[in-house]
Image (cartoon, rainbow, N blue to C red):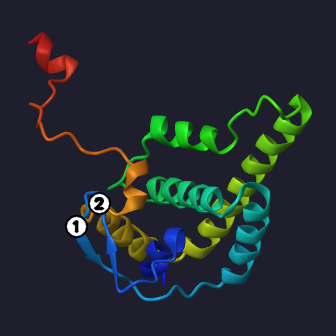
Amino acid sequence: MWKFIVALPLALAPAQAKSVDGSQVRTLPEPEFKYQAALQRVDQKVAKLIGEEKQRTLRELAIAAVLSDYCAAVDLDKNKFTSTFDALAATDLKRPTAEQRTLENNLMTYFGVYVGLLIAESTDREHEFCSVAETIKREKRPLSRFWLTPSPVTSAPVQSSTTARK
């Protein structure tokens, strides 16, 4: 079932989706999750709090973080992740400090709920989960924007300290 996690962030309903670089990629079937109802309830609460676009971004951040935690093929770009997360609760000068703090706390809580539900979905399907992550990265799907891009330059093997002393 993890094959379908790609459809979560943007609900890829059209026949084709565009990758980050604009090329066409195949769309995966509709997701089937044990915790779909719970994810949808969280989606509704978050959308009510910060709007649908930011809700999708928060869910994408959770998916990107979980995939990068489970799968060796992807590494979270912590700078991109942090800047995107911070933008979700950007300080509004008209908002009182206590209200701002409550918003930030709610976002962190909902992020944690997303992560927990996604981990629960993926625990027994790690191989499928990681193959989906590799596909997302290879096809440069929008979710991959939160991951580091491997350097095109290959480096020479690193000498160990014992080899260098000889």
Relative to 37, is 17 on the left or the right?
Answer: left
Residue drawn at the location 40% of the way across and 76% of the way down: 128
The quadrant holding residue 101 is top right
Q: Position of residue 94 (x, y in %)?
A: 83, 32
Q: Which residue: 42% across, 80% down? A: 3
Marks 1 and 2, Cα distance to the nearest angstrom?
9 Å
- Asked if marks 1 and 2 touch (Cβ < 8 Å), the reply is yes
User: Which quarter of the rendering shows the C terminus?
Assistant: top left
Q: Secondary structure at mark 2?
A: loop
Please provide percent x and percent y for residue 60: 54, 60
Q: Residues within 10 Å of mark 1 (few under 14, many from 20)?
A: few
**Snapshot quadrant of residue 88:** top right
Relative to 40, residue 77 above or below = above
Circle nearer the viewer, 1 or 2: 1
What residue is at 31 percent from the left and 58 percent from the top?
20
Q: Nearer the viewer, residue 21 or 124?
A: 21
Q: Amino acid at mark 2?
A: Lys
Q: Is 17 in front, or is 135?
A: 17
**Marks 1 and 2, the one that precedes in the sequence:** 1
Q: Is residue 164 above or below residue 98?
A: above
- Compared with 22, 145 (above or below) is above
Q: Position of residue 87 (x, y in %)?
A: 61, 40
Mark 1 is on which residue type?
Ser
The residue most toward the top is 165
On the image, numbered disc 2 is attached to which residue?
140
Q: Which residue is mark 1?
A: 23
Q: State the residue in front, 156 or 87.
A: 87
Left or right of 4? Residue 101 is right
Height in image: 51 above or below 14?
above
